[in-house]
């Protein structure tokens, strides 16, 4: 008996070959995927090291993000020249340079938007953008904040940006980075992060706008303050304590009867608060000052004076002798300037300004004799400090001690009616 080999129809044979090929292809994929996954797997230690390296790069304040793509809702650019498209951070100045000439442009405009644009221009908007000059934008970096997600797969670097024309430090932009691949995104820009020293970037010196030029000048200290000067320019709150010696009490209203008894001298402590505004833009070492201080004035004499008194019943007068005391409260508001010499930890200073004094609560006190049966009734024996405002000037000299973030000033001041030694501690 002869056996004959059965032959399948041609179409069935083709299906069987395709099925066998598909099975072999799937088995190959299953063999490749685990090997690829094993090669790209990153350990926790490696990821931690990558995060630390990225933090070091960001904290250096000198890095560059090479722009690979620019994508918005209206258009996208790819195949950019990496040396001409970058985001550079250096010396607290963020520079974004974009050169889209020769890039592959894809538009997301609708048909009606395209027709409206073509009706207004001979060139398509995307073609115009592709032919435009290199653009460069500048921003001052006010401060930065860096965060990492829980798995360590993404680092968010917040950059608080401003310009002299828009000094709003609360507006920030986010730089999002993969610490393993250093792929990064910054708004509409995507690319990869690298040290600025390793990047090859092209400075095409494009034309800058007035706002951009002011930002550059501001960072370079031309027509504005440098970053170091901005740190020095600040308002410092201070507390004041001192002691004043009043050698001419022109503000007293003194009855003629006791002129010979009253010694026109008084001394008192002084306490208060103030503000120093340091302005190196005007002059290095210059500070504008304003302060409000309080001094209690007391003038007394144990030598009795003869006054006329009457009984509380209203009948009869009697001459009696009483020790006396004149007291009042004084508020001083000073406006002035202080200039320090040198840059050491101890710097000599000079200061000058105007002072406005206000006297309150002026009273004349006395001790009552005869168990309170008599009281002073003669108006001539009431005196105190004149109410109202009185203006004057002062000059002074001393030393300023640098205590790190704080300062301590000791100075001796002299005015037309007093002299005093004061200490000021500025926070």
Image (cartoon, grey):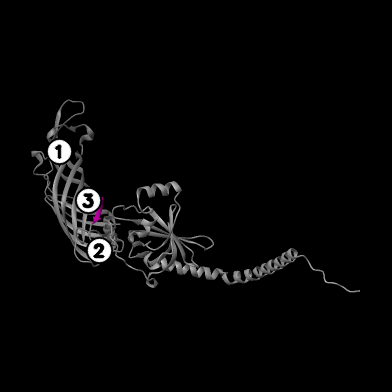
What residue did someone put label 1 on? 383
Nearest to the observer: residue 320 or residue 7: 7
Give x and y (percent) for residue 313: 21, 26
Q: Classify residue 175 as left or right of residue 16.
A: left
Quarter of the figure with residue 30: bottom right
**Which quadrant of the figure contains the N terminus?**
bottom right
Of the numbered discs in the image, which one, if any, rests on residue 416?
A: none
Give x and y (percent) for residue 374: 19, 32
Q: Is residue 279 visible?
A: yes
The residue drawn where x is 21% and y is 65% is 347
Nearest to the observer: residue 44 or residue 297: 44
Stretch in magenta: 269-278
Cβ atoms under marks 3 and 1 closer than 8 Å: no
Of the numbered discs in the image, which one, if any, rests on residue 401?
A: 2
- Majority SS type along the magenta span: strand
Q: Classify residue 3 as left or right of residue 51.
A: right
User: Does residue 209 sit above or below 365 in this rendering?
Assistant: below
Secondary-structure class at tag 2:
strand
Secondary-structure class at tag 1:
loop
Mark 1 → mark 2, Cα distance in angstroms: 43 Å
Mark 3 → mark 2, Cα distance in angstroms: 19 Å
Whichever of callouts 3 and 2 sits on the residue coming sooner in the sequence is 3
Judge the density around disc 2: few (<14), some (14-19), many (≥20) Cα neighbours within 10 Å: some
User: Does residue 347 sit above or below 74 in this rendering?
Assistant: below
Give x and y (percent) for residue 350: 16, 59
Give x and y (percent) for residue 203: 32, 67
Magenta stretch containing residue 273, yes or no?
yes
Marks 3 and 1: which is nearer the front? 3
Of the numbered discs in the image, which one, if any, rests on residue 290?
A: 3
């Amino acid at each position: 008996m002869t056996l004959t080999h059965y032959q399948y129809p041609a179409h069935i044979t083709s299906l069987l070959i395709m099925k066998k090929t598909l099975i072999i292809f799937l088995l190959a994929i299953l063999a490749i995927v685990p090997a690829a996954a094993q090669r790209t797997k990153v350990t926790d230690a490696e990821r931690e090291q990558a995060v630390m390296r990225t933090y070091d790069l960001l904290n250096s304040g000198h890095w560059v993000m090479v722009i690979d793509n620019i994508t918005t809702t209206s258009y996208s650019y790819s195949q950019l020249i990496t040396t001409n498209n970058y985001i550079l951070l250096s010396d607290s100045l963020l520079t974004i340079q974009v050169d889209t000439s020769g890039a592959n442009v894809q538009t997301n405009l609708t048909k009606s938007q395209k027709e409206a644009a073509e009706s207004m221009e001979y060139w398509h908007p995307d073609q115009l953008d592709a032919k435009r000059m290199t653009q460069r934008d500048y921003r001052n970096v006010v401060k930065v904040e860096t965060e990492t997600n829980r798995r360590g797969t993404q680092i968010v670097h917040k950059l608080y940006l401003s310009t002299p024309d828009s000094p709003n430090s609360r507006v920030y932009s986010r730089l999002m980075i993969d610490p393993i691949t250093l792929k990064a995104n910054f708004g509409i820009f995507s690319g990869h992060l690298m040290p600025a020293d390793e990047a090859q970037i092209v400075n095409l010196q494009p034309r800058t706008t007035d706002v951009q030029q002011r930002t550059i000048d501001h960072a370079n200290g031309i027509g504005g303050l440098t970053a170091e000067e901005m740190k020095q320019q600040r308002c410092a709150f201070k507390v004041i304590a001192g002691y004043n010696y009043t050698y001419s009490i022109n503000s007293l209203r003194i009855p003629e009867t006791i002129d010979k008894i009253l010694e026109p001298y008084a001394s008192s402590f002084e306490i208060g608060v103030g503000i120093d505004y340091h302005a190196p833009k005007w002059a290095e070492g210059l500070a504008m000052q304003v302060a409000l201080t309080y001094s209690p004035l007391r003038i007394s004499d144990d030598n009795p004076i003869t006054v006329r008194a009457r009984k509380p019943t209203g009948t009869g007068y009697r001459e009696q002798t009483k020790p006396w005391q004149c007291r009042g409260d004084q508020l001083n508001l000073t406006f002035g300037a202080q200039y320090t010499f040198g840059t050491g930890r101890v710097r000599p200073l000079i200061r000058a300004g105007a002072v406005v004094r206000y006297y309150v609560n002026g009273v004349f006190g006395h001790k009552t004799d005869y168990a309170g049966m008599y009281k002073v009734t003669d108006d001539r024996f009431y005196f105190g400090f004149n109410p109202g405002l009185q203006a004057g000037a002062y000059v002074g000299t001393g030393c300023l001690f640098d205590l790190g973030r704080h300062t301590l000033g000791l100075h001796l001041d002299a005015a037309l009616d007093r002299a005093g030694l004061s200490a000021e501690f500025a926070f």
